[in-house]
Image: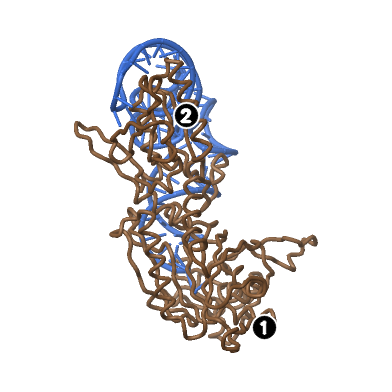
Chain colours: A brown, B blue
Amino acid sequence: MDDIVSLCKRRGFVYQGSEIYGGESGLYDFGPYGVELMNNIKKSWWQANVHAKENYVGLDSAMFKHPKVWEASGHVGGFADPLAECKKCNNRIRVDKELGKIGITADEKMSEQELNKLFDENRTKIKCEKCGEQDFTNVRMFNMLVKSNLGDFTGSDERPVYLPGEACQGIYLNFKNIVDTTRMKVPFGIAQIGKAFRNEISPRNFLFRTRELEQADTQFFVKPNENKDAYEAIKQSRWDWYISIGIKKENLRWSQHENLVFYASDAWDIEYNYPSYGFDEVEGVHDRTDYDLSQHMKFSGVDLHYSDPYTQEKYIPWVLETSMGMGRIFLAIMSDAYTVEDLGDGQSRTVLKLHSDLAPIRCAVFPLLKNKPELVAKAREVYKELSQHMVCEFDDNGNIGKRYRRQDEIGTPYCVVIDFDTLEDDTVTVRNRDTTNQERVEITKLKQIIS
RNA sequence: GCGAGAGUCGUAUAAUGGCUAAUAUGCCUGCCUUCCAAGCAAGCGAUGCGGGUUCGAUUCCCGCCUUUCGCACCA
């Protein structure tokens, strides 16, 4: 894992966020090659989940949403637990529950200050369950939602808005819009790639757990109780995508949730075998019944029933969700592709064996020698033409082997070399990243061969 | 958030209460090079931030930040 983090930095894939100020926890910036790779992953995902499927459409919803959205989703109320910690044994107590035990009602809408006041007044009556001590820290509210003051010019914090805790809510909010303005009929799906923000207590494991993340979500709407077959099909489709982008099968597995949230009917995760900490979730595929639409119907007062044009029935569709963490898939792809080949004699070659559709650079163009102007000029010409059609890089620095290695390390599948024969017959060599074999081809056929 | 460790050029390492902070690699410029990290020469580039002790701190102390591991958290 250290090697991958180091490569990410060294070769301009991923940098620590706000690095020149000492860094900011849980935030990462994607560098020149990182953003290319990330865009290619998104493109592949979008192709597989929107364009290749007749009954899916895309969406891009505003990041900020009406505050009530997060009440409806359960993010505001259910996940703001007031906690205090025992200074002796570090055990944590739920302050509202402990107060409840001694007959004092702590309202869940109380502020941190109000709770602290209540807690301070009653500290003597509360003991740590583990060690019996009464020495606690102050009460802290733990809520993962990130607050903002969009549209609040009073400075009073009276109307807090939240950054999205998950990207998928925008899909539920637009379900009715899409039914009303497109020809989509249940069963159909909506796909979206969006950012989410979480106040993770402890960001960890590089891109795996961050405070700002991006999610690629699909929500598939089905008739109630007609979820099972569709769910299995979606699971299969998601698995196939991972295989199609070249992830090794042995590094992937399904894992079923043992404790389902109350509304879910089934939940499976796709896990990747990350270096150094093992299998962990990349994507969740969840069968969520009608919970999401029902909640928004309740909180917004808008009828979100669907009228089935074939049967005239009215119902709230059930939702089958897929939600992939972009940072997590990025890290999985990098890990899976990272290869160090032993060439003997203590020599080795570092290669990122990325699927060629994902590689940040599709093709690198080199003149064989830098000090032969006619080679350089010809190489520039080839580069200029190719770069109209694919992501290319020109390099004439150092010897040819070094330039191959540089491209190997960032996963460039093809290197094109202009040599003296090129000047005679307009052919070039195309070198393959994985085999290092070369093939002599005509310049006119280049585009076709490597795109 | 708690506990423990760590933080030196882009990367990987070295060293030091006081000399110009070293080595490799990288990057870069020039020469050279007719296909897999060759060579020669020049250059770039670091003690995370702030405070304290001290004549002098990268080194010792404190705070903060970042990061790693464990706990907890992860709907």
Q: Are marks 2 and 1 in contact (CB under 8 Å)?
A: no
Question: Is residue A266 shown above or below A253?
Answer: below
Query: Which mark is drawn over residue A275?
Result: none
Mark 1: few, some, or many residues within 10 Å (few <14, many ≥20)? few
* Residue that sits furthest to the left in the current view: A345
The span from disc 2 to disc 1 (Cα, nearest Å) is: 60 Å
Q: Is A301 on the left or on the right of A344, as rendered? A: right
Tags 2 and 1 both on a single chain: yes
Comparing labels 2 and 1, the label whose residue is closer to the camera:
2
Q: Nearer the viewer, residue B75 or A394?
A: A394
Q: Position of residue A356 (x, y in %)?
A: 40, 46
- Quadrant holding the C terminus of chain A: top left
* Local secondary structure at mark 1: loop
Which residue position holds label 2?
A382
Subunit that carries the residue with mark 1: A
Residue A99 shows in the view: yes
* Local secondary structure at mark 2: helix
Q: Position of residue A443 (x, y in %)?
A: 42, 31
Amino acid type assigned to the residue bearing label 2 in the image = Val
Q: Nearer the viewer, residue A417 or A113?
A: A417
Which residue is located at x 45 percent, y 21 percent? A376
Q: Is A127 on the left or on the right of A310, as rendered? A: left
Which residue position holds label 1?
A303
Q: Position of residue A48 (x, y in %)?
A: 46, 60
Q: Nearer the viewer, residue A64 or A242?
A: A242
Amino acid type assigned to the residue bearing label 1 in the image = Asp
* Residue that sits furthest to the right in the current view: A154
Question: Is residue A29 shown above or below A248?
Answer: above
Q: Position of residue A318 (x, y in %)?
A: 52, 80
Earlier in the chain: of badge 2 and badge 1, it is 1
Q: Nearer the viewer, residue B53 or A182?
A: A182
Mark 2: few, some, or many residues within 10 Å (few <14, many ≥20)? many
